[in-house]
Structures are given as C-alpha cells and as structure tokens.
C-alpha cells in the first residue's frame, strides 16, 4: 500500500499568513493527488485534484503543486473560514489512501 | 446541484449486518464511479470501497474485504454497501462519494454521512 505522510500534523497561523502543508507518498503517484478540507461534523470538501487543479467554486487562495512523491497545498492569505483539518489522498493506485490530516488553527 | 443522501446507519451488535444506501441526484449516475469512505470517531479518513460506473471494476480495502459488498443500481441512481460480520472497529461515519471527472479516483462530491455503531 502507498503510505501518505502529511506535515505538519497541526499548524497555527494568523489571518493573512501564507500557509503550506506538505504530503509525501511512499512511492510515485504521478499527479494523482487530491486535497480535502474538513470542518467538524461535516463531510470533506474537495479543494484540489490532480495535484494542482482547483475544484470549481474553491477560492483561488488555495493552490496545489507537486508530482511523483512530494506535494504541497498552499493557502496564500489565510482567512478565518480556513480553520479546518486538511487531508491529502492518493488517487493513483488501489487501495486508495489518505494522509493522517493536518489541523489548521487560526491564531 | 449534485446531492448524495446516505441512509441505513444505526446501532448493530458485533457479528451483525447493515445495508447502507446512497441516493444520488443531479448528475448522470451511471457515468461515474462511486465510493465509500469512513471516519471513526476522532480519527482520519479511511477509504472502504469503490465501484466503476458500469460493468466490473470493484475495489475494497483489506480491512473490509470478504465482509462488505459494494453495488449499485443505475436504474435507481443508488449506491449500496452491504456490511456483514460487523466488528467494533467498523464503528464510523460512512460517507458516500462521487468520483470526479478527469481526477482518477479522487472524490468531488460527498454525502453528509451516516453513523454506524457496532456495539453490544
């Protein structure tokens, strides 16, 4: 199975900050990586697919990059509504696997 | 607006069975692969199973293989998950999710989830 490792596990940042979350795959997955945002008690929401494609309706402050084994989710200017847990998911090979999550807190 | 509405969750004893349903609307259901993802209380996301739009292509996590069966009825726009021989570790919120177009196996729409509790 492909292991997905996110870092950091948690981060605290201020409104307006630039925040970066990384995800590393244990083997190459080409561009087949997705990022999700999940708020407490809610279903996950797709932010980025195919490593860098912005899902329709998602604010442009969210961006993704990477290929192969190393990927990054960047929030260019943090907003209060961005407080959530973020997950990466490899969509290349079964079994599909998720990262352990990164909890983002607004200071 | 795409909608996915899960039902069928509840409390079941260890060793018991449940069948989850997911009613889909506002998209051509048969054209899209679908999946189930679960989340144990306080834990992360775990993929359970996926099924292609038509004909073949069914995949399971090792943790549920042989106990869970995914299926779909394209005439009813409904996805199912038959869960047998349930264990305490199957306790989770189960989400139905639609696979996105041109996204390989990532999920662009999710239901609200249905809670399955396995306990005596």
Image (spheres, rainbow, N blue to C red):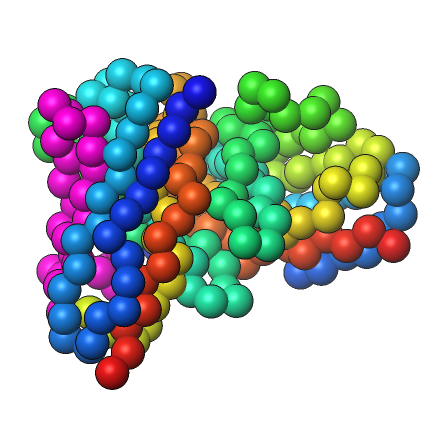
Q: Is residue B59 left or right of residue A105?
A: left
Look at the image and tell me in which quarter the C terminus of chain A lies. Answer: bottom right
Look at the image and tell me in which quarter the N terminus of chain A lies. Answer: bottom left
Find the residue positioned furthest to the bottom. B120
**Residue A81 position (above or below residue B108):** below
* The magenta segment: B60-85
Q: Position of residue B57 (x, y in %)?
A: 16, 34
Q: Nearer the viewer, residue A59 or A62?
A: A59
Residue A43 in the magenta stretch? The answer is: no
User: For the point 58% across and 47% down, which residue is it?
Assistant: A38
Q: Position of residue A67 (x, y in %)?
A: 55, 33
Number of numbered labels in the structure image: 0
**Residue B56 position (above or below residue B16):** above
Q: Is residue B13 left or right of residue A60?
A: left
**Residue A4 position (above or below residue B42):** above
- The answer to which quarter of the image holds residue A53 is top right
User: For the point 61% across and 21% down, which residue is it?
Assistant: A57
Q: Is residue A77 left or right of residue B25?
A: right
User: For the point 70% across and 30% down, which residue is it?
Assistant: A62
User: For the point 82% across and 51% down, which residue is it?
Assistant: A106
Q: Is residue B96 left or right of residue A15?
A: left
The reply to whether residue A8 is visible in this rendering is no
Q: Position of residue A60 (x, y in %)?
A: 72, 22
Q: Position of residue A6 (x, y in %)?
A: 60, 54
- The answer to which quarter of the image holds residue B117 is bottom left
């Amino acid at each position: 199975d492909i292991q997905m490792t996110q870092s950091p596990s948690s981060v605290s940042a201020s409104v307006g900050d630039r925040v970066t979350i990384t995800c590393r795959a244990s083997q190459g997955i080409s561009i087949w990586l997705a990022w999700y945002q999940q708020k407490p008690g809610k279903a996950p929401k797709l932010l980025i697919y195919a490593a860098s494609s912005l899902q329709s309706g998602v604010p442009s402050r969210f961006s993704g990059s990477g290929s192969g084994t190393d990927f990054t989710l960047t929030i260019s200017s943090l907003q209060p509504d961005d407080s959530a847990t973020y997950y990466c998911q490899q969509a290349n090979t079964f079994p599909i696997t998720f990262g352990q999550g990164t909890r983002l807190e607004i200071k | 607006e795409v909608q996915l509405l899960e039902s069928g969750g509840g409390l079941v004893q260890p060793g018991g069975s449940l069948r989850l349903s997911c009613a889909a609307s506002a998209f051509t259901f048969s054209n899209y692969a679908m999946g189930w993802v679960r989340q144990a209380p306080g834990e992360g996301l775990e993929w359970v199973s996926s099924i292609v739009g038509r004909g073949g292509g069914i995949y399971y996590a090792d943790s549920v293989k042989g106990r869970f069966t995914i299926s779909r009825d394209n005439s009813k726009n409904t996805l199912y998950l038959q869960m047998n021989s349930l264990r305490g570790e199957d306790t989770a919120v189960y989400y139905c999710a639609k696979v996105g177009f041109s996204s390989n196996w990532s999920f662009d729409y999710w239901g609200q989830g249905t809670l399955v509790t396995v306990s005596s």
